Amino acid sequence: MNTATASLAQAASATRTKKRFAILAMLFIVTTINYADRATLSIAGPALSKELGIDAVTMGYVFSAFGWSYVIAQLPGGWLLDRYGSKTVYAASIFIWSVFTLLQGGISFLTATATTAVVVLFALRFLVGAAEAPSFPANGRIVASWFPAAERGTASAIFNSAQYFATVLFAPLMGWITHSYGWPAVFVVMGLLGIVLSVVWLKTVYTPKTHPTVNQAELDYIAAGGALVHMDQPGTQSRSFAPESPKLGYIKQLLSNRMLMGVYVGQYCITTLTYFFLTWFPV
């Protein structure tokens, strides 16, 4: 038995807390709200487009606004996570996308000028996409810091399943809100829910080394299993490993790797289907 295996076995034998699962629960909840907010326009779409006089082509452009900014902001979002840490950047992300979701409810006051309303709606959806960009990279970073390699696949599967659970839970709820209180209420309710969630996130999510109730046995267990427990810990990285500014050369490396090209194709196909169900299917 090598040293790492012996350390893992010894750590596993000790009584340890399971705070990593509470962190995973928060990732699941946040990802559920994340995807529910993406679907708000789809649920409110029929009533909204009728009131504003938006045709199908214009609605397609509005739907696409989220995707454009989400793509553009992915790499800057990842750099921000590396630079300032997952907890802070993710909290800001939740708060900002929730504010922009909330503001979409105010589009109803612009119905006298349909063109202006469409432009403002497009801009707000664009900003929601940019604000949500760090979410999945942050999920991956947090799982990598809290979970040993043997549990990482399961943890990732759980938070990924939240994107489909969001439709199951919130589609009928948002449909009922639209029917009962009008389409602006969907944006208001989901925006306020996200703002509250950003505060809850700050109060409940920590790095492994800063969590107030995690015990040493759990820290030893996840560290021995390969968890990057020092990832967001100030002062634990040498200057040579400090996050660098983004460079164009990085993009070339990402686009020239054959294995990653396979990942891109697979993700593209999955996302195409997923976003059809998040946009046009409810409409």
Image (cartoon, rainbow, N blue to C red):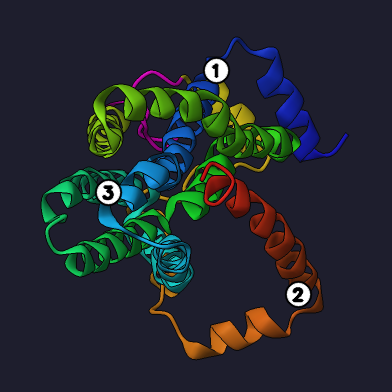
* Magenta part, dominant SS: loop
Report the side of 15 relative to 46 (left or right).
right
In this orientation, which residue lies closer to the viewer: 23 or 244?
23
* 135 vs 72: above or below: above
List x then y, in percent, for residue 9: 76, 24
Residue indicated by mark 3: 51
Q: Residue furthest top?
A: 15
Residue indicated by mark 2: 261
Q: Earlier in the sequence, mark 1 or mark 2?
A: 1
The residue lying at 40 percent from left, 47 percent from top is 45
Q: Residues within 10 Å of mark 3 (few under 14, many from 20)?
A: few
Tell whether position 243 is magenta. Answer: no
- How far is disc 3 from disc 1 in space, using C-alphas? 50 Å
Residue 147 seen in the figure = no
The residue lying at 77 percent from left, 38 percent from top is 3
* 41 vs 217: above or below: below
Q: In the image, which disc is placed on residue 18?
A: 1
Q: Which residues are magenta?
A: 203-214
